[in-house]
Structures are given as C-alpha cells and as structure tokens.
Amino acid sequence: MSWAYFALAVSALLFVAWVVQVLKRRWSWPGLVASIGCLVTASFNSAAPFRGYIDPDYVGYGFGLVSARPGIAVTLIAGSIFLASAASALIAAGRKTGRPLWIVSATCAALAIIAGLPTTLQAIRDPAGNAIQLGEYLTIPGWAGSLILIALMAVPFLVGTIWGARGAMAAEPASIG
C-alpha cells in the first residue's frame, strides 16, 4: 500500500470538510490562522496512526518532541494528534466563540510545545542552518527558512491557544458574586 496516497486521500477529505466550514463564513482571522496550522498538522499525521500498527516495515514515529516505536504506541500518539488537530481545524474554521474552542486552545497549546518550541529553539540556535531546499533550483536561505519554519510551526499554535481560550471564555456565563 502506498501510504502517501492514503495520507493524500485522508487529507483531501479533511480539506473538503474544512472548506465547507470556511464557506459558512463564521470564522475570524485568528481562528483561520489556527485552523490552517491544525489542518496542516492533521494532514502530516494522517497515515501514521494506521501505518504504525499495520506496516511491519514502519521505522517509527517522530513529530517534534514526540516519538514512538512501531506498534500501538504510534497509533495512540499519532492518532491523538491527528484527531485533536482535525477537530480543532474544523472547530476553529466554523466558529468565533463557544465552549468547543477549549479543544482548539488545548490542542494548539500542546502543538506549540510539541512542534513549535523545538522549531523555534533550533531557529534561535542556528538560524542560518535552516535552509529550505525546494528541488535543485530553489533554496530558501537559512535566515528566511528559519522565519518560515517559525511562521508555520509556532505562530498558528500560539495564536490558536490565545484566540481559542478567549473565544471559549466569552461563551462562559458570568459568575455572580
């Protein structure tokens, strides 16, 4: 089985659901930023939950600070990241307030630590060492590469953590006394 095709199919289905949510126009700009970050993360993690358990040639799972050996551990860890990210992408694209935004906030906080923190620390330690190679004819130099990586792997999750918590608290009833 080609796991790339499997991941592409799952990602395409998730993308269609995401577009449906976005077209309802109930989103805000910070929610859209968080939603896109979660959508990309879900797509990156879409095949691992299945492959880690089924594929005897799978070498193991690694995503930011999280890693697992092949087997049920990959299914549980990567599956949790996929489900939380997919749910958060759809929730953030479909609403501005409400208790479900706690899911977005918690997911984004976890992803900021799991993926954003190591990306940012690496960029700070060696900003010139993060060149992004796009084929043999286009290379984004280290400093620009570092900024792009931070923009993709940290900023959406920081935005989502704050925006999600604010939106969730706005829906909470005011306490008396």
Image: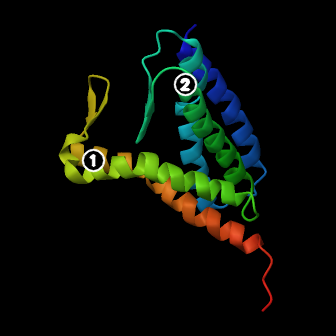
Residue at x 66% of width, y 38% of height: 83
**Residue named by callout 2:** 48
* Drawn side of residue 175 relative to residue 149, left or right: right
Report the Cα–Cα distance between label 1 and label 2: 25 Å
Is the residue 130 above or below the residue 110 in the image?
Answer: above
Tell me the crowding category of disc 1: few under 14, some 14 to 19, or many 20 or more residues within 10 angstroms, Cα based: some
- Going by the numbered disc 1, the residue's amino acid type is Gln
Asked if residue 153 can be seen in this view, the reply is no
* Drawn side of residue 41 relative to residue 18, left or right: left
Residue at x 27% of width, y 47% of height: 122
Percent across and percent down for residue 25 are 75, 55
Q: Nearer the viewer, residue 81 or 26?
A: 81
Q: Secondary structure at mark 2?
A: helix
Is the residue 64 above or below the residue 161 in the image?
Answer: above
Which of disc 2 and disc 1 is earlier in sequence? 2
Q: Secondary structure at mark 1?
A: helix
Q: Nearer the viewer, residue 158 or 102?
A: 102
Location of the C terminus (image quadrant): bottom right
Residue at x 65% of width, y 25% of height: 10
Residue 20 is drawn in which quadrant? top right
Location of the N terminus (image quadrant): top right
Tell me the crowding category of disc 2: few under 14, some 14 to 19, or many 20 or more residues within 10 angstroms, Cα based: many
Is the residue 5 above or below the residue 145 in the image?
Answer: above
Residue at x 53% of width, y 27% of height: 74
**Residue named by callout 1:** 122
Q: Nearer the viewer, residue 62 or 167?
A: 62
Percent across and percent down for residue 90 are 70, 46
Number of on-image labels: 2
